[in-house]
Amino acid sequence: MKSTLFYLIRLTSLLLVIVFLCKCQSKHKFDIHKLEGTWVEDTQKDYSFTEIWKEESNGLSGQGLEINQGNSKVTENLQIIEEKDQLVYKATVIEQNGGSTVSFPAISESENEITFENLQHDFPQNIQYKILSEDQLQITVSAKAEGQKQEFVLNMKRK
C-alpha cells in the first residue's frame, strides 16, 4: 500500500513537471528576443537607419530612427506582440497613415528568420527579419505593385 502510494505521488509529480515544462516552451520557432538591443545600418553613407528594440510584458517595443549627418529622428514606433497565438509586427509611422498603426501578421518563421505580411497595405507588404549571426541582422522590406516587386535590404549590426 505504501509503495503504491509512493509510486503514485512520484508519477503525479513527474507529470506536473512535464506539463509545466511544455507550457513554458514557446510555440514560436523564431525567438523575438534575439532582436532586443540597438541595430545600426552597416553603411558608410551620411544617411542610415537604426532600430532599437526592448522587452515589454507582451513582447517587444521599438523605434525606427533615421540618422542623417549625425542627426537622429524617430520615424516609426514598432511592436512585435502575440495576438491569438500569432506573432504580429505593428508599425506606427510618424506622418503617415493618419497616425494609424499598421499590423503585419507573421506568415512564416524559422529559428533565424521571420516574415510578416499585410497585402492590403501599399508599402511595405512584407517585412522580413533574418538573423545572420549574434551581431548581424538583415531586414528586407518589400511590396508588389502592378506586377513589379519593390524592395530594399538593410544590413544591420548590433551596437
Image (spheres, rainbow, N blue to C red):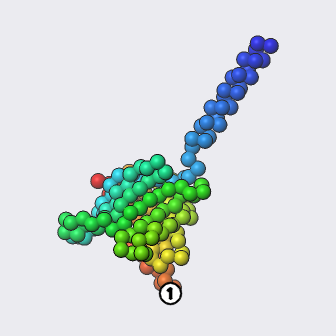
- Nearer to me, 102 or 15: 102
Tally the numbered discs: 1
Q: Amino acid at mark 1?
A: Glu
x%, y% of residue 7?
A: 73, 20
Give the residue at x 71% y 22%: 9
Report which residue position mark 1 lands on.
146
Q: Residue pushed farthest left?
A: 69
Q: Can residue 153 be seen by looking at this rendering?
A: no
Q: Is 64 situated left or right of 122 in this image?
A: left
Q: Is residue 40 above or below residue 34?
A: below
Q: Residue furthest bottom?
A: 146
Q: Position of residue 159 (x, y in %)?
A: 29, 53
Q: Is residue 61 visible?
A: yes
| Residue drawn at (33%, 68%) of the image | 75
Q: From the top left corner, tell me how far across and down residue 117 is, in percent.
A: 52, 69
Element at label 1: loop
Identify the residue at the far top of this view: 2
* Residue at the (43%, 75%) spot, across then down: 97
Q: Residues within 10 Å of mark 1 (few under 14, many from 20)?
A: few
Which quadrant of the figure contains the N terminus? top right
Q: Residue at x 50, y 56 (%)?
A: 81
The percent coordinates of residue 5 (x first, y second) are 76, 18
Task: Looking at the picture, tell me which residue is in the foreground, 111 or 3.
Answer: 3
Q: Looking at the image, which is closer to me, 94 or 124?
A: 94
Residue 45, compared with residue 133, is above or below; it is: below
